[in-house]
Amino acid sequence: MDIVICKDGSDLNARAADAIVAQAQASIAARGRFSIALAGGSTPQDTYVLLAQPPRVTLIDWQKTFVFMSDERCVPYDDDRSNFGQARTNFVGHVPLPPANVLPIPTDAGSPDEDAARYAQTISEFFGADLNGAPPPFDLVLLGLGDDGHCASLFPGKPTLTETGKWVVSSPPGTLPPPVDRVTFTFPLINAARAVMFLVGGANKAPAVQDILENAPPVTKRPSAGVHPTAGLLTWLLDEDAASLLSAQTRG
Ligand code: 6PG
């Protein structure tokens, strides 16, 4: 696990964008394609904007890049609360990604459970992986962190936290806004990734960051404590405010 402390929000976004470019180039060089699952929420949006701007926009082979979402709010994409909607406005709609390479979570299959099942099928077909088998490895899964320690839409105390078979599930709303149903990657799918990167900014996140990185809290209390890639790299990108309660030892 790497803990990277950035001096401020714009440093965090620049480093996150550079890390995504590096992971894209390495994945395409090694396997001919790059599969990334984007995070929702406000923190990664400026990173997405940077990816769509020079010089970084010219450093990724978009023909070989495939964009997924690690969680979604069950609203239409043109709703302000839509994670894919935000990513499309800030990034996906501004880079030369072939439409077939953009694979958001459906929110119109009839119910959140059906949205989740359909997305798991999409992932299974993309990777050629058996839905009843081990989850396939995304090259990079991006995650944000809620003030309560949730990530994706894996909320404290919810049954989604103990899912061991399914790759994608629905979830009722958490305690933090927006109060809408969700579809989310599960821990098995997140932890199968070749790389997982948390983007965390702001003093309001500092208590959860300190608890997760220093106290090994129960996952039911701090869901992000359940993110431990089986064979992949875990990176926590933090700005100074989010890292403000960490000990000198943890800061390294
Ligand atoms: C969501 C996100 C969620 C988010 C955190 C942090 O759908 O809300 O996927 O997990 O990453 O809540 O959100 P902020 O970046 O807005 O603080």
Image: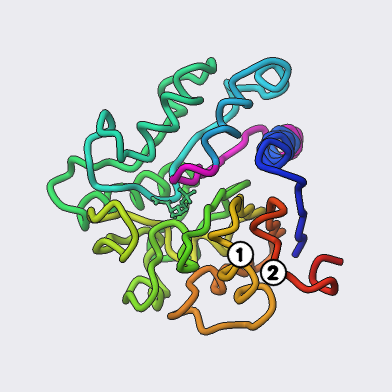
Mark 1 C-beta closer than 8 Å to ligand 1: no
Query: From this viewpoint, is residue 5 visible?
Result: yes
Task: Specify the label residue 245 is tagged with.
Answer: 2
Say whether marks 2 and 1 touch (CB < 8 Å). yes
For the image shown, how many numbered marks are present on the structure?
2
Does residue 225 appear to the left or right of 56 in the view shown? left
Would residue 82 be found to the left or right of residue 208 on screen? left
Rendered image: mark on residue 139: none
Q: Identify which residue is drawn at 24% across, 47% down.
A: 74
Q: Which residue is mark 1?
A: 206
Q: Quadrant of residue 170?
A: bottom left
**Mark 2: C-beta under 8 Å from nearest atom of ligand 1:** no
Q: Please report the bounds of the magenta region as a residue range.
A: 25-43
Which of 107 and 8 lies nearest the eye of the viewer? 8
Q: Nearer the viewer, residue 150 or 165?
A: 150
Give the class, few, some or many, for how many residues have Cα within 10 Å of label 2's Cα (few <14, many ≥20).
Answer: some
